[in-house]
Amino acid sequence: MKAGMPGGRRHFRGRRAPCARRLHFYNSRMDLTALTALSPLDGRYAPKLDALRPHLSELGYMRDRVQVELTWFIALSDAGFAEFKPLSSAARAYLHGLLRDFSELDGAAIKAIERTTNHDVKAVEYWIKSKFEGHAELQAATEFVHFACTSEDINNTSHALQLKAGRAVLLQGLDAVIERLRALAQQHAGVPMLSRTHGQTASPTTVGKELANVVVRLAAARAQIASVPLRAKMNGAVGNYNAHLSAWPDFDWEAFARKVVEADEPAGLGLSFQPYSIQIEPHDYMAELFDAVARADTICIDLARDVWGYISLGYFKQKTKAGEIGSSTMPHKVNPIDFENAEGNLGLANALLRHLSDKLPISRWQRDLTDSTVLRNMGVALGHAVLAHQSLLTGLNKLELNEAALAADLEKAWEVLAEPIQTVMRRFGVPGAYEKLKEVTRGQQVTREALHGLIATLDIPAAEKERLLALTPATYVGMAAELARRV
């Protein structure tokens, strides 16, 4: 077989084969940067998610685990056990300082321990114990760190804390979208707009009313997200306080666990108590929360697509920014990229959120680990939603209403007045009202003159004729403006 033929050997003199260079590049170890990150959330879009990262990153997860361990440890000291006296104010201040000052260096130290333990929760426990060295009071109580806890007592509470903080970030972005929509709805409450049901001309509305519809829907979805209780359990290996009662059989461990879970920080965790569980908290509340977020995301997709369409129709223009390019070959274009970016990220968010809500409530018997790796993607799912809300807000802030285009569309759609004319005819008992209007309007170009000619022949009171003759597509908007101003 000759060199250069399929399957043969190619000879490169004085230079390396192109494929060899590529292999060298891709096989070399790259430092993790915004350019080398596998996920765009930690690459291209990293600066936009700075508010979420401290809570839903692995470092945030570690910090929450430390918070849970220390909260449980301090609470045990206050439980009245002879073997564990209440901690001094100095010891408490030191422990609170460990949490307050928790840093990436601390996270790296925990990861170093995990390389030996191959167990992430045990690594946190050992790190805390290492911080007791040199503090006689704390060293004497070392064995009460992680006392009677299974790993999931620490993990499920930490996940709830992560979601508590992550939900606050998500709602902040969603609220900004809702408030911008509300402002636009009220600003454009009285601006008439042609409706398009099934893509066809239909009874007019106003721009503000259409935006108000979304405000009301998103506000309801937002309330659902905010109302989901974030549950946590602290009841041991299979949810029965077995280990706890083996140590102190006469102590009310359930009441103690409830207090730790429900009390406000720093005495407790500020969560909702889950009294019944297997080894893991059943995750039903997570499914409820993720479904609620996905529902809000679906409404946002509806909004993004509609605004995209209105931009295409020319109803909205987009403010331009110096230096920005819409198309690499067509200089005139101002593409609706913010709404497209939002739609794409909302779709990614919902795909992950729905998998989370479908998978997490299912665990084989008392425990399997399939939830563990899935739960590490909560930040990815919420990150795409947070990113989408930012894109929506950016897009909404760029919109400029093109009232001339709206008016021109309405002026070409006199057929929409067939509805009020036939409705008034029916009021006064004119037989076959609907059929008569259908005959002269359906599938035809309808003019003002044709409709006025029809009105003139109607056997209805003169005042009603005058009212119909005064009607235009732009004034036939019902109570749209009033509804828009209410939101």
Image (tube, rainbow, N blue to C red):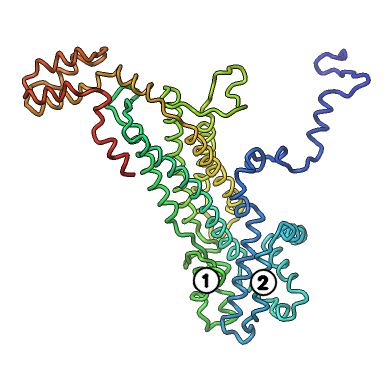
Above or below residue 301? Residue 229 is below
Q: In the displayed structure, does residue 465 sit left or right of residue 17?
A: left
Residue bearing mark 1:
240
The answer to whether residue 39 is above or below residue 109 is: above
Mark 2, residue position = 95
- Is 333 placed left or right of 203 in the picture? right
Residue 476 place in picture, x, y as percent: 24, 27
Q: In this view, does 286 lie above or below 308?
A: below
Is residue 286 visible from the viewing direction of this image? yes
Q: Foreground: 143 or 240?
A: 143
**Crowd band around label 2 with a 10 angstrom C-alpha radius: few (<14), some (14–19), many (20+):** many
| Mark 1–mark 2 distance (CA, rounded to whole Å) | 29 Å
Asked which secondary structure carries label 1, the reply is loop
Q: Which structural element holds mark 2? A: helix
Mark 1 or mark 2: whose residue is earlier in sequence: 2
- Image coordinates of residue 464 in percent, x first then y, are 11, 25
The part of the image, by quadrant, that contains residue 191 is top left
Residue drawn at (66%, 73%), measured in percent from left and top? 145
